[in-house]
Image (cartoon, grey):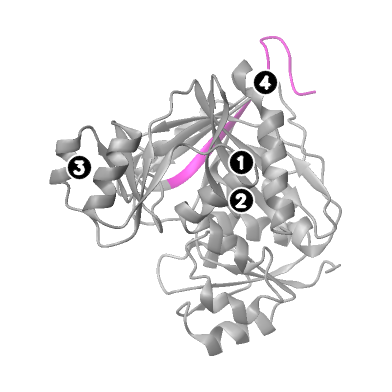
Amino acid sequence: MIKPGGTIGILGGGQLGRMLAISAAQLGYRVIAYAPAGDAVIAQVCNEYIASDWHDAEALKAFADACDVVTLEFENVPAAPLDAIADKLAPHPRALAIAQDRLAEKRFVADLGGTPAPFHAVDSRADLLTGIEALGTPAILKTRRDGYDGKGQWRIGSREEAEALDLPDAPCILEGFVQFECEFSVILARRADGTVAFWESSQNGHEDGILARSTLPGAAIIGEQVGEARRLAQAVADKLDYVGVLTLEFFASESGPIFNEMAPRTHNSGHWTIEGAATSQFENQVRAICGLPLGDTRRVAPRVVMENVIGSAAATAHEALRDPSAHLHLYGKTDAPEGRKMGHITRLEWPEGETSS
């Protein structure tokens, strides 16, 4: 166990790290963040921020040596340099390596009995056309690495569009379309001893490829399928000997839960847990990696809605506070281009005439 007063290292400088650092401080831990120079909003709330390249082995080792445990706040950290600090890292770099490659991720989940969307590896134009023949159209071409929030993705509506597409100079994966009723997440926290806690699954709505809102309770079909989805998520966590918070995203379809992707970290669709659950995903991440008992994950209000604040909407986001049920989180970012996540608002809702007390 790493007792309060110890030092937690966080790889990455974004809003997930920022909220994680706040939870760590609440429990009495020091936080050192490590990320390349840039708009690192975590620097506003941590004890120390090291701006250095991921491949600077000397700086990375010095950072790890100053920490009792190291975790990460996003998955696009190069996995190879982390092998040198694997003894300090939670989760282990192998979880990161799988999550960084969409093809490896889907094969890994399929081997554990999960059902991913139909897919085909694409390394050439010929591969793409073969995939179109196998999966049909419409289909989505994605880079195997680095894409998120709709980036690195192309919708293909016909063979002719596939023939005309300017292929990216990177390995890709073609995914067939899935008929589904809604999307949901399974978020769990796992300790090193195998103890697991799940949060309730939110129903997730996207706009322009970016998560717009998460709502609880979700549609009835989520409740019908969440048991199977949780069994897969736990199988993934157990296979990886995972420590920390892990997220798997699913499509709820007529045939059952269809696996979409995983994230070896806290997740945007879990931000509702800060006010909406007895223990947030960020606090349980700290508890898990430090060997503390996991906190209660129950939802604390009849209805919880989390909405992202995107781009220029940040300038007027404070107006949401006219609603006493609203909780505003702004991430401290200075530039607000359209499509950038600037914050979120969570509302805890009770039926008229009822209150939280």
User: How many angstroms separate mark 2 from mark 4 (CA)?
Assistant: 24 Å
Query: As shown in the figure, which amino acid type bears the numbered disc 3?
Result: Ala
- At x 61%, y 87%, the residue is 62
The magenta stretch spans residue 354: yes
Q: Nearer the viewer, residue 187 or 287?
A: 187
User: How many angstroms separate mark 3 from mark 2 (CA)?
Assistant: 35 Å
Q: Residue furthest bottom?
A: 58
Say which residue label 1 marks: 270
Which comes before the other along the chain, label 4 or label 1? 4
Q: Which residues, given as a range, are shown in magenta? A: 342-357
The label nearer to you, 4 versus 1, is 4
Q: Residue furthest top?
A: 353
What percent of the width, then of the height, locates residue 95? Answer: 61, 60
Secondary structure at numbered mark 4: helix
Answer whether labels 1 and 2 touch (C-beta < 8 Å). yes
Say few, some or many: other residues with alpha carbon within 10 Å of mark 2 (under 14 / 14 to 19 / 20 or more). Answer: many
Say few, some or many: other residues with alpha carbon within 10 Å of mark 3 (under 14 / 14 to 19 / 20 or more). Answer: many
What percent of the width, then of the height, locates residue 133? Answer: 28, 37
Query: As shown in the figure, which amino acid type bears the numbered disc 1?
Result: Gly
Say which residue label 2 marks: 266
